[in-house]
Image (cartoon, helix red, strand yellow):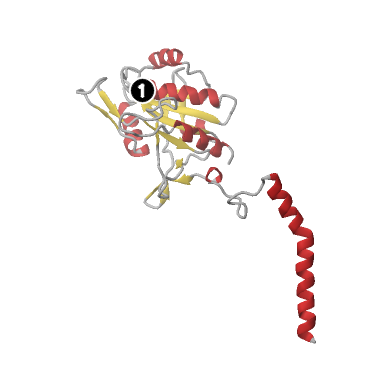
Amino acid sequence: MKNKYSYILISLIILIFGIIFIPRIIDRIVAGNVTEHDRINLSEDDETLGFIYLNNEKRKVPPFAFLDQDSLLISNKDYKGKVYVVEFFFTTCPTICPVMNTNLVEIQEEFRDFDGFGVASFTINPEYDTPRVLKEYAEKYGINDMDWHLMTGDRQEIYDLANIGFNIFAAEAPGVPGGFEHSGLFALVDKNGYLRSRSDEFGNPIIYYRGTISESRGENEEGEKQQITILKEDIRKLLNE
């Protein structure tokens, strides 16, 4: 008798479940609301960005302080609470810098209404790129966001910031067009000053974003894909954190 009552109880539970939930599931299927990942509600776009580690520690932007295009002293503290993109460039660059800054101006326009977004541009030719020169360059490219600072200062401090602080290559090279070499990469920094990025298909952080290929071009001669689109997506993710 005990087993009989147990079976009856289980049957009642199944019946109640069916009455309550099956119509809801059918309604969702009819409405097209059931997705492949519905049970855990995850998608690639929902994934948070990873931190960049060095010696098992999250990499953070080191302290810096330089003059910007308006001759204002700007430091890493001025970016606290902001999501920002970092680049190293120079105004007389005849090759990749014009593409990089055209891409950044496009990003500037997309995030113009966001008070929590900025750009930090550091010249690797500070002897020539004075605040006045940087101001003219900003006007030429339409760089007018108040949180986009083009900075100049002590040459060694800038190179240490690039090569050690960010691990973004920059060097003087008299034999190349413009006299300087640099990687053309963008770093993405979160509101707390940590370097962040998405992961590649193998689960490894991409670390930096290609700044030398435009969205409209798609890829370069080597077949490398543009990363401005994913950079925009990742900026939004950090702004929403």
State which quadrant residue 167 falls in. Answer: top left
Which residue lies most toward the bottom here? 1
- Against 188, residue 144 (above or below) is above
Q: Is residue 29 above or below residue 12?
A: above
In the visual, does 7 lie left or right of 175?
Answer: right
- Specify the amino acid type for callout 1: Cys
Query: Is 14 situated above or below 80?
Result: below
Position in image of residue 157 (x %, y %) = 34, 31
Q: Nearer the viewer, residue 34 or 85?
A: 34
**Residue 74 percent coordinates (x, y):** 46, 26
Of helix, strand and loop, which one carries label 1?
helix
Q: Quadrant of residue 13?
A: bottom right
- Whether residue 151 is visible to the viewer of this picture, yes or no, is no
Residue appearing at x 44%, y 16% in the figure: 141
Relative to 35, 134 lies left or right? left
| Residue 31 percent coordinates (x, y) | 70, 45
Q: Provide the residue designation for mark 1.
A: 97
